[in-house]
Amino acid sequence: MHNPVYLFTDVSVNPKSKIGYGAILYTEDVNQSIEELKSQVKLNQFTDTSSTKLELENLLWGLSLVTEKGFSKIIVHTDSQNVLSLLNRRKRLEDNNYQTKGNKQVNHHQLYKAFFEFYDTYHIEIVKIKGHQPGRDKSTLESIFTLVDRASRQALRKGV
């Protein structure tokens, strides 16, 4: 498929229970109505997780779904600083064999490697989205992101 797919990801986690929910939405058409897009949000529960780990797990889940559908050009929209900084950190992570200065394995190294494998295989662009904007100030993409933001928070509250 030649058209890009837009992938929106967000998560909510309970640090005490280490249970979290990831929400994703992917679409080729960001001009659909919010109601149409709302019905396309997908949720997944993750256990034994943290906010950093969950952001990566959810992104990998979303990338798996869109690549299984045949998309190869993927524009990821996220507010996760960890995800946004991954590409800048890649060289250092790889040069140090995913180890800290104390020769310990970097937390989540397997998830980082899995992301870089997706990145090397597909055309992926990561776009920073501003979360938690007032409604009147939101762009179309920010309004779509709000759908996954709300879905992950509601799922965590309800324990879907």
Image: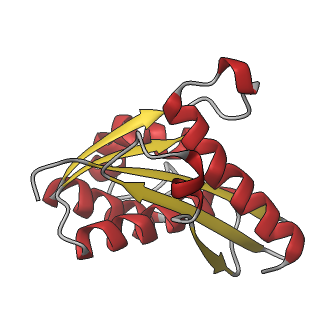
81 or 139, which lies in front?
139
Could you tell me if residue 79 is visible in this image? Answer: no
- Residue 110, quarter of the rendered image: bottom left
Residue 97, image x, y percentages: 32, 58
Residue 151, image x, y percentages: 70, 60
80 or 26, which lies in front?
26
100 or 126, which lies in front?
126
Q: Is residue 101 above or below residue 127?
A: below
Q: Residue at image x 37%, y 39%?
A: 126
Residue 47, image x, y percentages: 69, 81
Q: Is residue 111 above or below residue 101?
A: below
Q: Which quadrant is home to the C terminus?
A: bottom right
Q: Which quadrant is home to the N terminus?
A: bottom left
Give the left or right position of residue 22, taking residue 124 as reference: right
Residue that sits furthest to the left in the current view:
2
Residue 39, image x, y percentages: 57, 65
Residue that sits furthest to the top in the current view:
137
- Residue 67, quarter of the rendered image: bottom left
Q: How is the image coloured?
A: secondary structure
- Residue 142, quarter of the rendered image: top right
Could you tell me if residue 20 is visible in this image? Answer: yes
Q: Residue at image x 40%, y 60%?
A: 112
